[in-house]
Amino acid sequence: MSKVKAAVFASGTGSNFQAIMEANNLPCEISLLICDKPGAGVIEKAKNSDVPAFVFQPKEFTSKAEYEKHLVEKLREANVSWIFLAGYMRIVGPTLLTAFEGKIVNIHPSLLPDFPGKDAIGQAYHAGVKTTGVTVHFIDEGIDTGPIIAQETVEVQDDDTEETLKEKIQKVEHELYPKVIQQIVQTK
Ligand code: GRF
């Protein structure tokens, strides 16, 4: 039996994309990468994994709704049922949200609801918190809001720099995201 199909949306280096691709026993096939940044590192990673990468720039479309309508067509053509956001630096609008209701998941490098938005690791570091972490959640129309699926904590040690904290958080992300994907795809 063929596996359920999923797409990853990413705009950056793609370390989470890579971790998902390298996960054992993933219950879905990553059949598509959607990227809104030409030249992003994740595109090369998709090529190396033989995952087709579609690179779209919203500014090529007349509106956000038109951009997302085009994405929905691509996703439907590829038979995709799940979307995993992995560093997609854009707010998902109503067109995509409605088309994939309850099937869009995001990973965020903080313990939400603390430190939503950009540079969550820097925000937490400069706030001086002793504990931060990683959240995987379903998305809604807000910025890093939506029902939380899983969280894992990361302790900030006195000798941590922003860079070492980032490394620790990414290590947790790369283990947690594939694990959560496995659970939700199997149970939903
Ligand atoms: C990750 O920290 C993720 O939590 C956030 O964006 C970053 C993407 O990193 N949403 P990468 O491109 O997967 O390395």
Image (cartoon, rainbow, N blue to C red):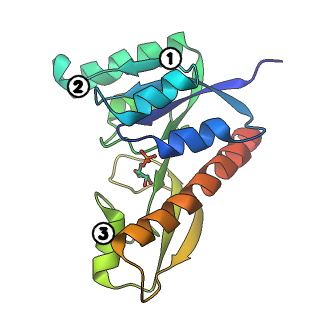
First-in-chain label (1 vs 3): 1
Q: Amino acid at mark 3?
A: Gly
Instruction: Tell me if I can see residue 68 in this picture.
Output: yes
Q: Quadrant of the N terminus?
A: top right
Q: Residue at x 35, y 15 (%)?
A: 70
- Quick one: SS at disc 1? loop
Q: Residue at x 57, y 19 (%)?
A: 50
Q: Give the label on residue 184, or none.
A: none
On the image, the x and y values in percent for residue 46 come to: 50, 26
Q: Residue furthest top?
A: 77
> Along the line of sight, which residue is nearer the eye, 2 or 140?
2
Instruction: Tell me if I can see residue 115 in this picture.
Output: no
Mark 2, Cα crowd under 10 Å, few <14 / some 14-19 / many 20+, is some
First-in-chain label (2 vs 1): 1
User: Mark 2 against mark 3, which lies toward the viewer?
Assistant: 3
Compared across the picture, whether 184 is left or right of 98 comes to right
Q: Amino acid at mark 1?
A: Pro
